[in-house]
Image (cartoon, helix red, strand yellow):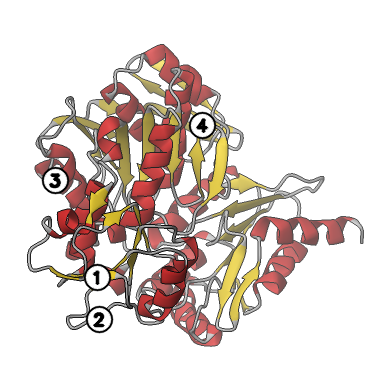
Amino acid sequence: MKTLEELALLVDGTKIVGDGGAQITGIEHDSRKVSAGNLFVCFEGAHFDGHNFINQAVSNGASAILTARENFQPPAGVSALIVRDMLKALAVIVPYACDYPAKKLRVIGVTGTNGKTTTTYMIREILTRAGYKVGLIGTIQMMIGDEIFPMHNTTPNVIDLQKIFTEMLNRGVNYVVMEVSSHALAENRISGIEFDVAVFTNLTQDHLDFHKTMENYRAAKAKLFDIVSRAGRKQNKSAVVNVDDEAGAFMLEHAHCKKITYSVKNNSDLRAENVSVRADGTSFQLGGKTLNLHVTGIFNVYNMLAAIGAAEAENISAEIIQTALENFKSVPGRFERIYAEIPFAVIVDYAHTPDGVENVLKTARQIAKNKIITVFGCGGDRDNTKRPIMGRLAAELSDVVIATSDNPRTENPEKILREIEVGVREKIGSKTFETIADRRTAIFRAIELAEAGDVVMILGKGHENYQILNSGTIHFDDREVAHEAIGGLING
């Protein structure tokens, strides 16, 4: 337990209003979850202001308020800590208040545009087989051992993240494997975490609505390698980097620790050779051994190499690594096949970037005996420059393209479709192209068009079971809709 004054001493330019000796039992930003003695954090955003919930927080037992409002006056009997910059203050205060739980665990962070989720699941599989209890933090869910908990952000904010690490430590976790987003790195959400291994998968266009330029995006990713290179409580830090990606060299420049490189094309420490991609899996040779895998696609070869590099960095035996990976099946919503008694394949994938679309469609081409029918959209209120690029790739690599809504959010879906269509028209030629704003209707249409030997690719949402519309969030799962459409086809 810390005092408000102890927290204030960590940050320059703070001011205490009220009792500096107030005992702080925890830090909370959700007024509904506040308990006795908590410090309530007043986040301010474009659509949300934590100050509006102070009364609820106080009624639930908050003893102090954390705010960036210079002349703030707390309610009677409650203290306040006033800071100049909320995010910078939290980055220091929260890990200290939680006694730095991540320093007592081995932590593997995976960053990159694509492949983070699958790579973290593969690493988890290896470490679990090696006998460790593993925590996983990612886009799809959080896991403690085999227990599953829902997630809402790729990397949670610093308060929630430190709580997660504390919970994992208390429940006997040895390793934490986590996806580390560029947003989290830019906003210091991972402050207070001492990483042991940093993994870089690749860098392609995404999130330019936030980062503005690819140079800024790359620099944000590189922060993970600055962090893993810092001296800390733990020893034996490593960087695992894809050197087939142009940005790999930049990540290596920021890594001042043990380096493990991987590739398919270039010389590296871990180079996959004689790669064979099939409909039912993939095989490749590595260091004289052949790995036979259930997952397919060249992108999964890279994910496997990244996982192998992380495992080798932590001195896991080659035998355990091979056994774990050869038994690895899939990740929800990542090139996930919808099984049914039909003469064509239906695959759901999370691909929502130009590189992701290109990778999965090239893999689909390797397994398709006939046409590729692609259903995809682009998210609203996000980087709109990638929309025509994704449209162009879909048209170039598919035989039938159906553009639809993804998560339009506050944008007009028809406007998004028009921006996608600009790219589609460049490459579609005489091939079939349709725009259907309603995603359910679009999926039904794709399956209606499918014939024997075709592959229907439903891209963009993968594991997500919701759709964010201007009117609010609704339940929507591509896999459920695909099953429904297939059922209607079978039952006539």
Q: Residue at x 36, y 57 (%)?
A: 37
Of marks 2 and 3, which one's residue comes earlier in the chain? 2
Circle 3 is placed at which residue position? 226
Amino acid at the residue labelled 4: Gly
Of marks 1 and 4, which one's residue comes earlier in the chain? 1
Disc 1 packing (10 Å; few <14; some 14–19; many ≥20): many
> Which one is in front in this view, the residue at disc 1 or the one at disc 3?
1
Amino acid at the residue labelled 3: Asp
Q: Hey, which residue is sitting farthest front in the picture?
A: 77
Amino acid at the residue labelled 1: Ala
Amino acid at the residue labelled 2: Gln
Name the side, left or right, on which 480 lies relative to 236.
right
Give the Cα distance between marks 2 and 4.
45 Å
Give the Cα distance between marks 4 and 3.
29 Å
Asked if the residues shown at circle 1 and circle 2 are in contact, with their CB atoms under 8 angstroms apart, the answer is yes
Asked if the residues shown at circle 1 and circle 3 are in contact, with their CB atoms under 8 angstroms apart, the answer is no
Viewer-closest of 110 and 329: 110
Q: Which mark is residue 354?
A: none
Of marks 1 and 2, which one's residue comes earlier in the chain? 2
Circle 2 is placed at which residue position? 73
Q: Position of residue 274 (x, y in %)?
A: 40, 26
Asked if the residues shown at circle 2 and circle 3 are in contact, with their CB atoms under 8 angstroms apart, the answer is no
Secondary structure of the residue carrying numbered label 3: helix
Q: Position of residue 357 (x, y in %)?
A: 46, 58
Residue 246 visible in rendering: no
Residue 277 visible in rendering: yes
Q: Position of residue 156 (x, y in %)?
A: 38, 55
Name the side, left or right, on which 317 lies relative to 432.
left
Instruction: Tell me which corner region of the image, top left, top right, bottom left or bottom right, holds residue 102.
Output: top left
Circle 4 is placed at which residue position? 145
